[in-house]
Image (cartoon, grey):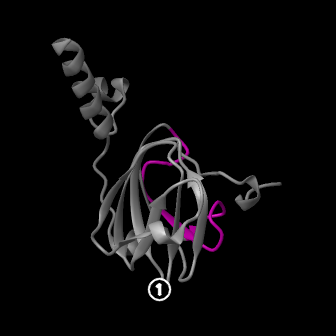
Amino acid sequence: MASFKMLVALLLIVASLGLTAAEAEDGPPEYIRVTPADIKWSPLPAIRGAQMAVLLGSPAKPGLFTIRVKPPANYKLPVHSHPDERARTIISGTYYSAIGDKVDTSKLMAFPPGTVSYVPPTVWQFAETRDEEVVFQITGIGPTRIDYLNPEDNPLKGR
């Protein structure tokens, strides 16, 4: 049992570094640095009105990724989940989020700048911004996507 726990711990460490078994044998990935001037924002079709910047990796491919998401002021993100676990850090603005399969604004918690949260895979959640634009950063292991509980909420439906 102890060796199994050690194996799991080692796999978690390798996964947290974003290394596949092949990369671990070939050496670490190239050193990457992204400055604020390097950040390129583009529309995020899966979330109406939001923008996204890819900082590291690719959320569409296997492996470690880091993105920033910028929803506009007064935005409501319907009930959704993601297939991957992720860590979210609020960079600017206050983000309001809650867990649940039905929007209940009384459950929303304020996430001010600097807040870090862990989001487990396949957990239904909903969120909103209020009187300001918000920027948050997500780091996870791809590939990822957003799954809406109500298919009618998916802006990609019919594409």
Q: Is residue 128 left or right of residue 1?
A: right
Q: Residue at x 59, y 72 (%)?
A: 76
Task: Find the residue positioned furthest to the bottom.
Answer: 131
Q: Position of residue 136 (x, y in %)?
A: 41, 67
Helix, strand or loop status at disc 1: loop
Name the foreground residue: 62 vs 123: 123
Task: Find the residue positioned furthest to the left.
Answer: 2
Q: Position of residue 82 (x, y in %)?
A: 53, 47
Residue 43 seen in this snapshot: no
Magenta stretch encompasses residue 47: yes
Q: Residue at x 58, y 64 (%)?
A: 103
- Please tell me how crowded label 1 is: few (under 14), some (14-19), or many (20+) other residues with Cα within 10 Å: some
Magenta-highlighted stretch: main secondary structure?
A: loop
Task: Find the residue positioned furthest to the right.
Answer: 158
User: Which range of residues does the magenta coloring cover?
Assistant: 42-61
Q: Residue at x 32, y 69 (%)?
A: 35
Give the quadrant of the C terminus: bottom right
Q: Position of residue 107 (x, y in %)?
A: 46, 66
Residue 49 falls in image quadrant: bottom right
Residue 9 seen in this snapshot: yes
Residue 88 vs 73, above or below: the answer is above
Magenta stretch encompasses residue 133: no
**Residue corresponding to mark 1:** 132
Q: Position of residue 7 (x, y in %)?
A: 24, 19
> Three-letter amino acid code at disc 1?
Glu
Residue 45 falls in image quadrant: bottom right
